[in-house]
Structure formats: C-alpha cells, structure tokens
Image: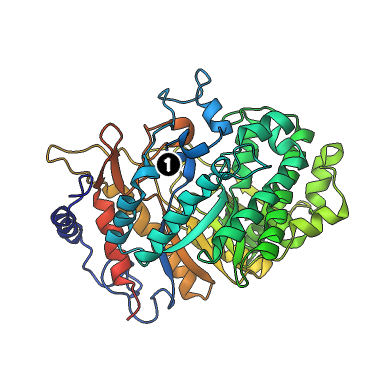
Amino acid sequence: MLNGFTRRRFAKLAAWTAALGMSSHSTESGAAELGAGRPDATSRFPAGFLWGTATSAYQIEGAVNADGRGPSIWDRFVRLPGKIADHSNADVADDHYHRYKQDIQLMKALGTKAYRFSIAWPRVFPEGSGAPNPKGLDFYDRLVDELLRNGITPFATLYHWDLPLSLQDRFGGWVSPDTSKAFGGYAAYVAERLTDRVSHIFTINECSRLVALGYGAGIDAPGLKLSVSQLNQVRHNVALGHGLAVQAIRAHGKAGTKVGPAENVVTCIPAIATPENVRAAETATREVNAGYITVMLEGRYTEAFLAQAGKDAPKYMAEDLAIISSPIDFVGLNVYKPDHYVVAGDDEHGYSLVPFPASFPHMYSSWLRVGPEAMYWAPRHVAKLWGVKSIYITENGTSAADNATADGNIYDVDRIMYLRAYLTQLQRASSEGIPVSGYFLWSLMDNFEWVDGFQTRFGVYRVDFATQQRIPKLSASFYRETIRQNAPV
C-alpha cells in the first residue's frame, strides 16, 4: 500500500470507468471519441505525443525551511490576515519534498511518460542572487534521477511565482530589471547543473497572471496595486526576464536543450466559425496578448498596445526587445477556459468581444467557464499567427467538489466530463496538423491552491492533508485509460 493507493483500488476504479460508457467506438461524426475505445488511425494523437502531469514547487513541496531554502514572497503573503480563504499556508502542503519517490509511483501508475515540475528559486538562491545553495539544487538532482529511473521525462519550469523574498525587499521584485537580471543568473546556474538530464525547460509560468494579480489587483503575492504605468513596466520586466533566461540556457545548457515559455494565453474564440469571425478572433488574440506572447514571438509591441498605453507605455531600449524575442523551441499553453468569444467588427479594431451571459456554465470554481473549444482554438491561433512548430498544453484540468462517498471513493464524473470534452478538442487540433507535442494534466494531486488554500482541489489523486494519504479519484482511472488507448501501436 502506498499512501492509500493500491493496485486493487485502481483496478476497481478502472472497472467503474468502463461502466460509465467508455467502450463505445464512435461519435455522431463517425470519428472515434477520445477515451471511448481505441481511436482509429485518422484520429490518433501523433507518434511521440507525450502524456504527462504537472505541479508547481510552492504548491506541493512543503519543507519551506529545509536545507537552506530562503523565504519566498508567498511565505510572507500567506501570513497576511485575510489573504488565504481557509487561513492555511504551504509550509507542509503535500510534503512532496520528502515523498517525491512515492509521488513518482503515482505518475507511473497513471502511465504518464512526462512530468512538468517547477524549481523553487529560493531553494537554489536563498537571496535570489549571489551564492547558490547546493543543497537546494540537490533535491532536483534526486527528483530528476528518480523520474528517469521510472521512465518519465522531466520538464522543468524555472519560475512558478515563488520569487525569493529578498528580491522583493531589495528591488521591489519585478518592478525592477534587476530582478530580470537575477533571473537570468539563476537560469544559467540551473542549466549548468541539470541539462545533462533535463532537455526541456519552461522559463516563466503565466506572466499575465503573476503581473495582473500579484502587482495589479493585489490578490496574489506580493499583493501590490500598482499604477497602470508601473504595471506595464512590471509586465515588460517579466518578459525581459524570460528573454534573459532563454539566452542563459543557450549559453550554459547542454547543446540541444529546448526552451520556451508557459503562458495562459488569453483565448479568443469565434462565436460562430465563419471566415470573418475566425479572422477577427485571430486579430483579437494577437492584440489582447500583446504584452506577453506577442512581444516574445514578434519582438515588438503592437501599435494598438502602445497607443492604448500612451504615456503609461513601458520604458525600454531597443535591445530589450531583441532579448525578449530570443528564439525559442516551443510554446507552452495553459488552457482552462474561453476568455472571449469574438465576432467581426466594423471599427478600427476589426473585432468585438461578446459579453458572457450570467447563465454561462462553469465548474466548481466560478472563474472556470466550460468551453472545450478553447483547447482547439488556443493552439490553432498560436500556430497560425506566429508559425510556432511545437506546442505543449502545459496545464489543463478543473476543480471539483471531490467529496468522498460512504465507500471512501471520489466519483468525480464532472472532472471526467470536462477532461473528455477538452481532450476531444485537442485531438481535433492534432488531427488537423496543429503541432501539439504533448499534454500535461493539472494536476497530479490536490495541493495548496494559492489564495483558495486547500479548499479547492484540482488533482486526480485526492490528498488527505492531515495524513498525507494519496487516494486515486475516478478521474485517475479515466486518465490512465486515455493514455493507454492512445499509446503508439
């Protein structure tokens, strides 16, 4: 038995999954439904497609004072009154720092072949820069080696929001380009140490959220509410940090190391897929992502972005844009929901964003609107607009109530519905030649869900945070079957 996980329990869950109707072989269109029997040759995911899971360091590791780790902005933020819904913190979280070998066995039981994890910057550089902490990176050495021993390919993320507190106190965090430069130095050190075994590195996770909620709305750490001009400068500095990290990995990593961002691209979907609306949705996607993916992939801010910002536009030198747009190997997309439905417009913008009605469906989290077609249009737009040749879905999943029944099991058929619908749209994208290279389910297990604390659950394994037991939900069996039925012949 492993933290509540047994093969018998997983087998029983698999039987229940089959009973949910997963053995039919076709949809109305005649194409095989994902997860409903083995897809035929025309609808399969491409050879080499990677199935994985994803987590982040602060949400699962715990051990915040272990082996020389320095404090992060989240360690302070969680202790501010009223910031975390259930008044919890991530001091222990899933205790993954001590239980990583057991958690890798959970991945292996799912049949996943890849794992996206993040490295805690304050473990490696407790002050953000200066002298590295060898014990901090030693943990990731052990984690990577254990993954490889179990046939799981490591995909590392350098920054998933846990900024070293020292950088916040010294420079104001991402308010200053000094933090961008420190990030480049951190990236260089990690590349030197890990790229002999880690061939794929994501630079920064969700630039847009960390800027908007951390420095604009004050909802996430560090909890600031900056002016528009200051916020645009933060946005620029984060993008600059990405570019400096790319350059550092090229200079210090092993030849052949691949690098790119992981962004929650604002997804614009044609309300009705007429040619005019599709073009409008593409235009909208380029403009509403102007401060992140667009500038990274084009090396310039759009005219509309600069015109709208006016005197509040970020201040920068031309060489900044060259750094920000350093060539990358792939783009990671975190896709959860449709952000906008779009129709063609007659004004200078060429598009209109349609308001969401109050009745629009959502999952357990009210922000998580259900729009499976986002999984098709997000990679389609990125490939079409910028010619990206490799795309990873770096996060996709949903919260759910996840209440255990009398028999102790979690029948999260709502999560299964969500995953089946979104994966079917991803299969649609793949079948049309959109270059999606892999999919990372968010998340492997329940964790510290930022300002929601532990009351919101995204995992396919339920975690009892009092005992640290990991228990497979019904969705774990669904994902296992999906991977098995889409494995290469």
Q: Is residue 372 left or right of residue 228?
A: left
Residue sitting at x 40%, y 65%: 148
How has the structure been colored for display? rainbow
Give SS at disc 1: loop
- Which quadrant holds residue 22? bottom left
Name above or below for residue 160 compared with residue 189.
Answer: above
Residue 99, image x, y percentages: 33, 46
Locate the C terminus and report the quarter of the image it occupies: bottom left
Looking at this view, name the residue that lies furthest to the top: 81
Q: Which residue is mark 1?
A: 61
- Which quadrant holds residue 406? top left
Residue 376, image x, y percentages: 50, 62
Q: Is residue 12 left or right of residue 355?
A: left
Q: Amino acid at mark 1?
A: Glu
Residue 427, image x, y percentages: 42, 68
Residue 27, image x, y percentages: 31, 69
Q: Nearer the viewer, residue 198 or 391?
A: 198
The 10 Å Cα crowd at callout 1, few under 14, some 14 to 19, many 20 or more, is many
- The reply to whether residue 261 is in sight is no
Residue sitting at x 36%, y 52%: 418
Q: Is residue 50 left or right of residue 384?
A: left
**Number of numbered tags placed on the structure image:** 1
